[in-house]
Image: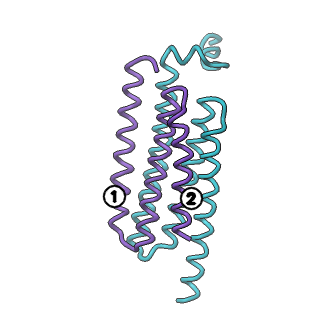
Amino acid sequence: MIIAAIIALLLFSLVCLVRVIIGPALLDRVAGADAIGIMLTVILVLLGQLFQRSIFLDIAMVYALLLFVDFLIIVKFIDHQGGL
Amino acid sequence: MGLFHTLRSIIGMVLIGIGLFFSFAMSVGMVRFPDAYSRLHAGTKGLTIGAGFILLGSAVMGPSLQHAAKTVLIGIFLFITNPISIHSLARANYRSHRARRRLVVDEYQEMKRNV
């Protein structure tokens, strides 16, 4: 069951990768990349559930934090640049 | 103990299924919506609710209480940070002039003009 959920989440993140590749503006690409990152965080939590080890949860926590900081840096870049 | 364990795993599987449905709706909306702002709308809501349900189901199914507490902590963190980041992205996109010329309707500008 958990393996099926992980495979489904990987397929959904592949669908979001299509939007990252074909997106017309930078906004679409950044939104798709954020969706992929959060899905990978959820996949890390499910892997910790699958292997019954809690080290995956620490990695997922740090990953979510770094994703947030990365995203804010990209947004700051777009805002200072004044255009897409 | 056995009945409790079975009940816990059934509830966790149902919650993970609901979260997978929301994630599926999010990925379909991310590809099929015609506009950039509606794609952001699909991304924020579907992703926050989907990830929240999946993390809640994983916390219910988890092996120990510490495991569940860490999972709930990650869920709370995602619930706080994901709307903030998408909101700041939409604001930065609105403030850039080249993107503002492509808008169909701009109610904020009309409201500022009327006040």
Q: Residue at x 60, y 47 (%)?
A: B46
Residue annotated with mark 2: A8
As drawn, B53 above or below A69: below
Viewer-side label of 1, 2? 2
- Spatial distance from mark 1 to mark 2, Cα to Cα? 21 Å
Dot 2: what SS?
helix
Callout 1: few (<14), some (14-19), or many (20+) C-alpha neighbours within 10 Å?
some
As drawn, B35 above or below B54: above
- Amino acid carrying label 2: it is Ala
> Could you say which quadrant of the image residue A23 lies in?
top right
Q: Which chain did the renderer colour cyan?
A: B
As drawn, B37 above or below A14: above
Q: Which chain did the renderer colour purple?
A: A
Chain for disc number 2: A
The spot of residue A44 in percent (x, y) is: 42, 60
The spot of residue A21 in percent (x, y) is: 50, 35
> Could you say which quadrant of the image residue B18 lies in?
bottom right
Q: Residue at x 64, y 14 (%)?
A: B110
Q: Residue at x 52, y 26 (%)?
A: A25
The mark that comes first in sequence, 1 or 2, is 2
Dots 1, 2 in contact, CB < 8 A: no
Residue annotated with mark 1: A59
The spot of residue A15 in percent (x, y) is: 57, 46
